Amino acid sequence: MMITTVVIGADRGIANSIARQSLERGERVIAACLAGNDALAEAGAEVHGNVDVTSGPAIDTFAAQLSAQNVSIDRLFHVAGVLGLDEFGTIDYDDVRRQFEINTLGPLRTIEALAPLLHEGSKVGVLTSRVGSLGDNGSGGMYAYRVSKAAANMVVLNLHHDLSKRGIHVLALHPGMVATELTKDYPGDFDYITPDVAAAGLIADLDGLTAQTSGRFQHSNGEFLPW
């Protein structure tokens, strides 16, 4: 039976790579985009535009469209996110709220709306970041991003507890240092990987997700990370 994979935030970057690689694996791919993506549609994905994770009505419309098609979701990747840089003393609190709305409430809102379309054995991966790990924070800074991703990690753990009652497995995902539009202004010198490499690792993480590893935080290289 063909696997149905839903990818949220598939306009570009890591999510776009996940959608493409899932298509290459022979899966039915439903790509939720903020705008649209003709190239993904031409590759065989079912593209839905205007899926804004900060908008309840937009997410409800998307969920209703899938429900009307009797979609049963086997895999759900929530990747949509934003990164803004700040330091103590120069924090823009409007931007903090914006990042929280997208990075934290976005996945919660979307997964809650799509939950009726999940089934026993479904797998859900939420892209967060080790920058949001309390146990891995050795430098401080990046208040808005760290706080929103730390809160997203709690969302994932809560979703694990609630959805595991239905036999649904949930994983927090860290992609690694990926060269995308999101990270082009990130400070420091890193060995960046490509979106395709990150996507392959994240897909492998969900391949290996079981009831025993549900509710954990995993790097695209397979390593489990501290909360």
Image (spheres, grey):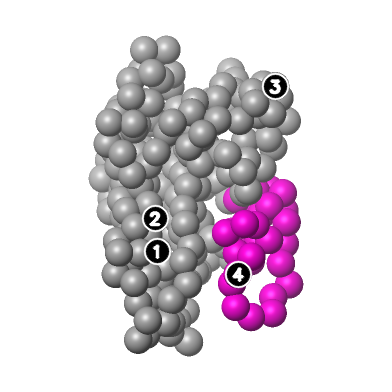
Query: What is the three-letter code of the residue carrying label 4?
Result: Asp
Q: Quadrant of the C terminus?
A: bottom left
Q: Kindly identify the residue that appears in the image at 72 percent across and 49 percent down.
A: 196
Q: Residue at x 37, y 70 (%)?
A: 144
Q: x, y percentage for residue 110?
A: 35, 39
Q: Is the residue under label 2 in contact with that under label 1 (CB below 8 Å)?
A: yes
Q: Which mark is residue 185?
A: 4
What residue sits right under mark 2 in the picture?
Answer: 103
Q: Quadrant of residue 21?
A: top right
The residue located at (39%, 55%) in the rendering is 103
Residue density around tag 2, few if under 14, some if 14–19, many if 20 or more, within 10 Å: many
Among numbered discs 4 and 3, the one appearing first in the sequence: 3
Nearer the observer: mark 2 or 4; the answer is: 4
Determine the image quadrant of residue 88: bottom left
Comparing 181 with 151, the one in front is 181
Q: CA distance from mark 4 to mark 3?
A: 32 Å
Alpha carbon distance from label 1 to label 4: 18 Å
Rendered view: 151 above or below 22? below
Residue identified by numbered label 3: 42
Q: Nearer the viewer, residue 169 or 93?
A: 93
Q: Which mark is residue 149?
A: 1
